[in-house]
Image (cartoon, rainbow, N blue to C red):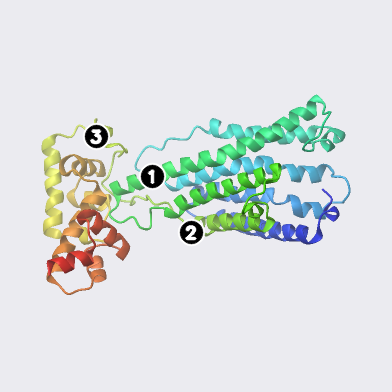
Amino acid sequence: MDPAALNFDQETFRLAAAVGLLVLSTFCANLLLLPDRHRRVRLPLALFFVAQSIELLALPVSYLLPGGEPGFMNLAFELVEIPMTMGQPFLLWLYVLRLTRDPTITFAVPRSVWHGLPIGFACILYLYILLLPAPLQAGLQPGAKDLVIWQSIAMAGLYGATILFYALVPIYSVMILRRLSRYRTRLKDLFASNESRELAWARWLAISVVAYWAFNVVAIVVSEFDLNFPGAAVFDSLLAAIIVRYTVTWSIALWGLRQRPGIVPPFTTHSTGPVTELPARKYGRSGLSDTRLDRIATKIETLMKDEHLYLQPDLSLWDLSDRIGSTTHYTSQALNEKIGQRFFDYINHWRIQDAKNRLRSSDATILAIAYDVGFNSRSSFYTAFKRELGQTPSQYRSKKR
């Protein structure tokens, strides 16, 4: 690539944007790799930013290397985006997988071979093109004719890699959304308050990545087929592309840098034994008799009625299990089979019942009542109240007075 042959203003803008994104990505990677108890969890996100940093080197390097015909180093930096971008969807998914891991159950290691195939293909293609003789490399241009077999293989690989990447982005985005859905369900087995653990930002981020992917697909179609429809200029705009990519990268950096795993069991607990996810097969081999389950359920009910344990804002399944002298496995089994509710729903049911009494009998503000009965925020109280009674606390109070 010869930068002098391009429009100066537009190319300067591209260079500035690339350098800015490069600095941001490198800085984020550095922060994520600092010593920390959760560094293993954040490692895939750090590698994501490392891959993006390497990918972004091509344009700045083209100004630093000698001009004229592209040399080997110039070509190496230009093509490195093939393996670097191919690995980014997998790394984002792996980050969410580790972030949502439940240490109370056996962790199923993903089949890395299948996930590594696209990355391996991209690396082989990258090395294959670099090993071609220079005259053959120079002929690898879109629309080129009279290609020899080695060039045809390279061009087919480049087109295949592009199609594969644009297929992987929505696939991994759907996998992330499904993982988050299972994670939110699991949280309801373990915690009574999940506001800081639900990773809503990751769900919106996955949706944003799909939107970014769609933007790029439309931009490619508009450019290739020279389409002209209302708004088509936006998809062919360098400024729009830069804004969209900065927004996605900044969002990943902003939330990813400060996120911690949501399921962290206490160091000292009576809980032993795994708690898997699906109620139908959840306790098939527990060996616990109905009599013992009834006793555990009775203890749970007594704690709620007499000691108002639900008033603890950060109550967890481990706390409840420790109070009744049982394992989390058996406590969860008693809740699901004998009481018929998940831990989250059960505790919030008691909180709502208490809130109903306070709304009828006191003049305290709704926010004060929400905090007094154990909720951590007004929004979570309103959500739970409306789900339980089909009306807001304000509507309930006005009807009961």
Element class at badge 2: loop
Task: Provide the residue designation for mark 2.
Answer: 258
Q: Amino acid at mark 1?
A: Ser
Asked if residue 219 can be seen in this view, the reply is: yes
Task: Provide the residue designation for mark 1.
Answer: 181
Dot 3 surroundings within 10 Å: few (below 14), some, or many (20 or more)? Answer: many
User: Quick one: label 2 or label 3, which is nearer the N terminus?
Assistant: 2
- In the rendered structure, find residue 283 and report the number of the disc placed on it: 3
Horizontal and vertical percent position of residue 286:
23, 33
Task: Give the side of residue 398 with respect to residue 77, left or right.
Answer: left
Number of labels in the image equals 3
| Residue sitting at the far right | 68
User: Quick one: label 2 or label 1, which is nearer the N terminus?
Assistant: 1
Instruction: Quote the CA–CA distance across marks 1 and 3.
Output: 22 Å
Task: Give the side of residue 88 with respect to residue 62, left or right.
Answer: left
Q: Quadrant of residue 108?
A: top left
Instruction: Quote the CA–CA distance across marks 2 and 3.
Output: 36 Å
Quadrant assignment for the C terminus: bottom left
Horizontal and vertical percent position of residue 275:
30, 39
Q: Quadrant of residue 297?
A: top left
User: Quick one: label 1 or label 3, which is nearer the N terminus?
Assistant: 1
In the displayed structure, 183 sits above or below 249; it is: above
Instruction: Quote the CA–CA distance across marks 2 and 1.
Output: 21 Å
Q: Which residue appears at 81% of the width and 34% of the height?
A: 144
